[in-house]
Image: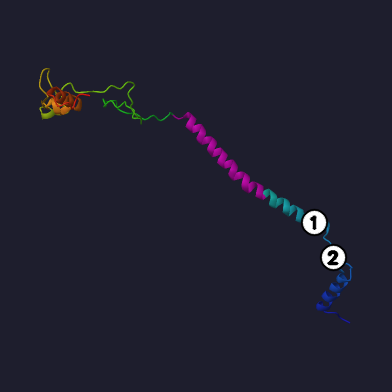
Amino acid sequence: MRTTADEKVRKSADDYSRGGAPAKLWRPSGLTIAVILLGAIVLIVLAFFAGYLPREKRIAQITAEAHEQAQALPRVEVVEVRRAALRSGVQLPGALQAVTEAPVLARADGYLARRFVDIGDRVKAGQPMAELEARARCASSPVQGGLAAGASGDGAGAG
């Protein structure tokens, strides 16, 4: 009786499911194992040289360029010398504060009537700078006003 391929597969599957080993295992010969190992070694060697040769080429090129740069004359930028404006200043933020402060008071009483010079004008010694309009002394300060009224006999400043 002849068995078909389908029946053989079912029989080997049944044998395997019962805990038995499949009927036929592939057992390679020594020559087959040697050929497989030789092919694997050849692939590894080819992969090694596929990475090694370009790397060695790059290293040789870099070494040649470095040697060429070491032997070459240095490049220097040349600038023509000419006179230029002096610009040596430093601007820094800060605040000025006087160590000693003194009040500035006018020596004469009155209002400014006219001004002869402006800020930044040059003046000569003795040149008038402004004209003052004199105020009435009795109305200028309450103390002087009170004394003047007391002297006249009102009695407002006494006491």
The kind of secondary structure element at disc 1 is: helix
The location of residue 58, given as percent across then percent down, is 56, 41
- Determine whether 53 is above or below 77 in the image: below
Left/right of residue 79 with respect to residue 45 in the rendered view: left
The residue that disc 2 covers is 25
Q: Amino acid at mark 2?
A: Leu
Contact, CB < 8 Å: mark 1 with mark 2?
Answer: no
Q: Secondary structure at mark 2?
A: loop
Which quadrant holds the C terminus? Answer: top left
Q: Residues within 10 Å of mark 1 (few under 14, many from 20)?
A: few
Q: Which residues are magenta?
A: 46-72
Looking at this view, is 52 or 100 the one in front? 100
Residue under label 1, please give it: 33
Q: Please name whichever residue, 128 or 28, is drawn nearer the observer in this view of the structure.
A: 128
Q: Which mark is residue 120?
A: none
Label 2 crowd (10 A; few <14 / some 14-19 / many >=20):
few
- Dividing the picture into quadrants, the one containing residue 5 is bottom right
